[in-house]
Amino acid sequence: MAGMDHSGMNMGNDGMAMMSHATLIPPELANDPATVASAAAMDKMMADMMVPYTGDPDVDFARGMIPHHQAAIDMAKIQLEFGKDPEMRKLAEAIIAAQESEIATLKAFLATKGM
């Protein structure tokens, strides 16, 4: 499979493509609160995950997973605010509980590393 052509994307100092999820919103959904909130949650996660590597894979994993899990919580809260499907709402509630617990575990681990 061929790689994605990133030549047209704005590249940050770290060489990673900087692309807002808001650019993926179709014009007809530009004022849809759930869509806008979801794109914002994804953009925040991507920005928050951009931390320098430490060389310690355990620390790097924990530091990357915290914003990833927080984004899952944020998106689940958007689902609870705007979603209607009972199964998706139940899943969102379970995601919030699980991810909050895992974030606490990750933060406790980082505290043992002085972070």
Image: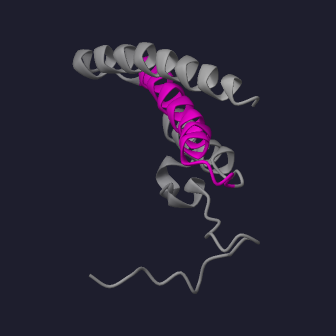
Q: Is residue 112 left or right of residue 83?
A: right
* Quadrant holding the N terminus: bottom left
Instruction: Name the spot of residue 58 as percent of width and height, x first.
Output: 54, 41
Above or below — where is 15 with respect to 98?
below
8 over 56 or under it: above or below: below
Tell which of 33 and 12 is nearer to you.
12
Residue 39 picture quarter: top right
The part of the chain drawn in magenta is 53-82
Q: Above or below — where is 108 with respect to 64?
A: above
**Residue 55 percent location from the top left of the image:** 64, 54
Characterize the magenta stretch by its predominant secondary structure. helix
Between 107 and 28, the one nearer to me in the picture: 107
Answer whether residue 33 is magenta in the image.
no
Instruction: Indicate the colouring scheme.
Output: one colour
Image coords of residue 113 (percent x, y): 69, 30
- Label tally: 0
Displayed quadrant of residue 87: top left
Residue at 65% across, 29% down: 110
Residue depicted at 50% across the width and 41% down the height: 35
Which residue is drawn at the image coordinates 61% and 48% (left, top)? 56
Q: Give the left or right position of residue 56, taking residue 24 as reference.
A: right
**Which residue ends up furthest to the left in the rendered image?**
87
**Is residue 66 highlighted in magenta?**
yes
